[in-house]
Amino acid sequence: MKKIILNGIEFNVNDLNEFEDEGRLKLEFTIVSEGDREYHLVKELLSKSKIKYENEENIIKMRMLSLSHQSPNELTTSTKAEFLVTLVQWIEDDDPSPTANLAIEMFKAEQKFNFLLDLLSEKGILDKTEFDKGFSSYFKSLNRKTLSDFTERVFGKRIEELDE
């Protein structure tokens, strides 16, 4: 287990892999949170679009490249959750616009999702028609607050502000 500092907060991480890819620093690591409070704190920090990584030499601006986590459905004070994180060094001059980055990430997520649906369907685990009906019902049940929370996390503005 190693310690790293993100946005001024020290974390114990597992499987820290620090390397250079296309001239940019990349970090891959796992954070294990314990308890519902710590889970929400870690999740909130990792949802930030810019993250400062401190090493022995300096502070490096990073951005989230990928994030996934595994946790039980119900969080308690003793629940452990695992966050799998990949950060990449943020370079202002050659970075696409935030909108382009968002479009690229949304496209990749859509392709991963479609691949997963096809794979599960081929294996007879999932019926696509049943899934589409169930998802449609689920999506309609989401409220505006959920959408507003999402847009605030992604764009830094609540949906009400984007409508203006």
Image (cartoon, rainbow, N blue to C red):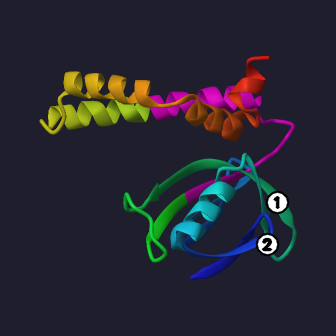
Question: What's the residue type where badge 2 is placed?
Answer: Asn
SS label for mark 1: strand
Q: Nearer the viewer, residue 112 or 38?
A: 38
Q: Is residue 100 visible from the viewing direction of this image?
A: yes
- Which label number is shown at residue 60? 1
Query: How far across and how far down the image is residue 128, in percent?
Result: 22, 25
Q: Residue at x 60, y 57 (%)?
A: 43
Q: Is residue 135 left or right of residue 122?
A: right
Residue 46's disc number: none
Identify the residue shown where x is 47% and y is 66%.
Answer: 82
**Which kind of residue does numbered mark 1 sit on?**
Ile
Distance between mark 2 and mark 1 Cα atoms: 8 Å
Q: On screen, 139 above or below 11? A: above
Residue 106 horizontal side relative to residue 133, left or right: right
Residue 105 versus residue 48 in the image, above or below: above
For the residue pair 32 and 101, the one nearer the viewer reads as: 32
Asked whether disc 2 touches disc 1, contact meaning CB atoms under 8 Å apart, the reply is yes
Q: Judge whether 49 appears above or below 80 on screen.
A: above
Quadrant including the C terminus: top right
Residue 143, image x, y percentages: 52, 30
**Helix, strand or loop status at disc 2:** loop
Depicted 36 relative to depicted 86: above or below: below
Quarter of the image for the N terminus: give it: bottom right
Q: Which residues are magenta?
A: 85-110
Judging by the rendered image, the residue that carries numbered circle 2 is 55
Q: Quadrant of residue 156?
A: top right
Q: Is residue 138 left or right of residue 157?
A: left
Is residue 94 toward the left or the right of residue 83 in the image? right
- The residue at the point 67 percent across, 79 percent down is 3
Please rate how many residues cluster around mark 1, counting C-alpha atoms within 10 Å: few if below 14, some from 14 to 19, many from 20: some
Residue 46 location, x and y as percent? 65, 56
